Image: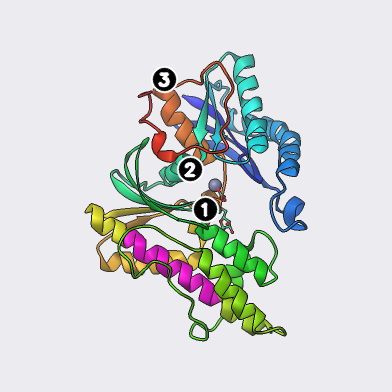
């Protein structure tokens, strides 16, 4: 089955064409970073208006590139939640309209299921069952994945997400939005031993996270240095990154050990962080655990991952209900395996 996929849950407009036999045929992502940067965060109304302008021409381009063999599109998948409701509705309305006009089925996909399945786009995909660490701007979760749509939440953050800890700390350090990648770059020149921030909840059993205290630690460090030099800021950045990464690595391996599994899948925007990847690799190797990631461009929001999730469900016969539904909130563990409604 060949499908078109659309992603518009936050500040990336994305479209992809995916074929069950031939894999990913075309995909495109437009990031609205420049639009939101002066506000220091995503402005939902501006995000929706920009999706409305970008999505249709983008869909035209991926259809042209992904349809050179003349085979038709047989389904449309789109992100139906969770996310910014106005932004979600732009992609939802477009996808549903195209499917209606072409008389083909459509299906709303869970954004986090997209992130979870992004590593399946790689030539050496992970097998099931495995433990997934999902680390994005809005979520930090450890999930036992028995198969597509079979997710057991093992633990999540009680407050800020890992990406949020990066973004809020980056803001305190005067870095542009979205701060995660900027903070990671600044940390490259930081001296690791100058500051040591707390490793939240690491000393306690369990698989929950808490990152909100870290921005307070960063705030105190920043306030204590009113004339902070570039080196001072880099020293704070590396301390923040170390605290987040150490916590993610330790809890992920704890989850793998608790479940008795030997495969860890890491996805979501923060999985692009090089320090996280390096430390996970070495810690996992010591424990005999294999770690899988999506390639860098599929760590952050994209439509290829939505296509993978949508394809698995459309081929199993899942279809949208008659009414249009986009969901700002949508618990991941309310999903069922494909075709099992
Ligand atoms: O998955 P994603 O694109 O969007 C959400 O669904 O949230 O993740 C975006 C998050 C942001 O918080 C961003 O700062 C963070 O991922 N991020 C990073 C890096 N690249 C993206 N955080 C740390 N290091 C990076 N290299
Ligand atoms: Zn995302």
> x%, y% of residue 317?
41, 20
The reply to whether the C-beta atoms of the residues labelled 1 and 2 are less than 8 Å apart is yes
Q: Secondary structure at mark 1?
A: loop
Tag of residue 112: 2
Residue 187: tell me if it is visible. no
Nearer the observer, 156 or 28: 156
Query: Which is nearer the N-term, disc 1 or disc 3?
Result: 1
Q: Position of residue 112 (x, y in %)?
A: 48, 43
Q: Residue at x 52, y 55 (%)?
A: 296
**Residue sitting farthest toward the left:** 260
Q: Residue furthest top?
A: 103
Residue at numbered disc 1: 136
The residue drawn where x is 33% and y is 68% is 283
Magenta part, dominant SS: helix
Residue 240 lies within the magenta run: yes
Q: Secondary structure at mark 3?
A: loop
The magenta span reads: 238-253
Quadrant where the image shows the C terminus: top left
> Looking at this view, is 205 or 43 the one in front?
205
């Amino acid at each position: 089955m060949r499908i078109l996929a659309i992603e518009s849950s936050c500040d990336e407009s994305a479209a992809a064409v995916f074929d069950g036999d031939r894999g990913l045929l075309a995909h495109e992502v437009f990031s609205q970073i420049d639009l939101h940067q002066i506000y220091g965060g995503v402005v939902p109304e501006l995000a929706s208006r920009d999706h409305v302008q970008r999505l249709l021409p983008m869909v035209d381009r991926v259809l042209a590139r992904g349809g050179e063999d003349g085979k038709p599109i047989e389904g449309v998948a789109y992100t139906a939640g969770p996310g910014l409701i106005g932004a979600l509705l732009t992609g939802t309305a477009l996808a549903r309209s195209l499917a209606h006009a072409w008389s083909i089925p459509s299906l709303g996909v869970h954004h986090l299921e997209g992130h979870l399945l992004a590593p399946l786009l790689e030539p050496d995909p992970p097998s099931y069952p495995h433990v997934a660490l999902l680390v994005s701007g809005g979520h930090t979760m450890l999930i036992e994945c028995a198969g597509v749509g079979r997710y057991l939440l093992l633990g999540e953050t009680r407050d800020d997400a890992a990406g949020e800890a990066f973004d809020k700390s980056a803001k305190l350090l005067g870095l542009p939005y979205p701060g995660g990648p900027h903070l990671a770059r600044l940390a490259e020149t930081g001296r690791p031993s100058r500051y040591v921030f707390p490793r939240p909840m690491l000393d306690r059993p369990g698989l929950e996270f808490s990152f909100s205290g870290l921005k307070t630690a960063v705030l105190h460090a920043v306030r204590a240095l009113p004339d902070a030099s570039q080196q001072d800021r880099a020293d704070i950045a590396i301390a923040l990154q170390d605290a987040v990464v150490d916590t993610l690595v330790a809890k992920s391996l704890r989850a793998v050990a608790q479940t008795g599994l030997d495969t860890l899948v890491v996805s979501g925007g923060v999985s692009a962080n090089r320090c996280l990847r390096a430390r996970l690799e070495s810690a996992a190797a010591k424990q005999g655990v294999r770690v899988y990631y999506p390639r860098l461009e599929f760590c952050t929001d994209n439509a290829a991952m939505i296509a993978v999730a949508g394809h698995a469900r459309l081929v199993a016969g899942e279809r949208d209900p008659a009414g249009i539904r986009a969901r700002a909130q949508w618990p991941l563990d309310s999903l069922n395996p494909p075709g099992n409604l």
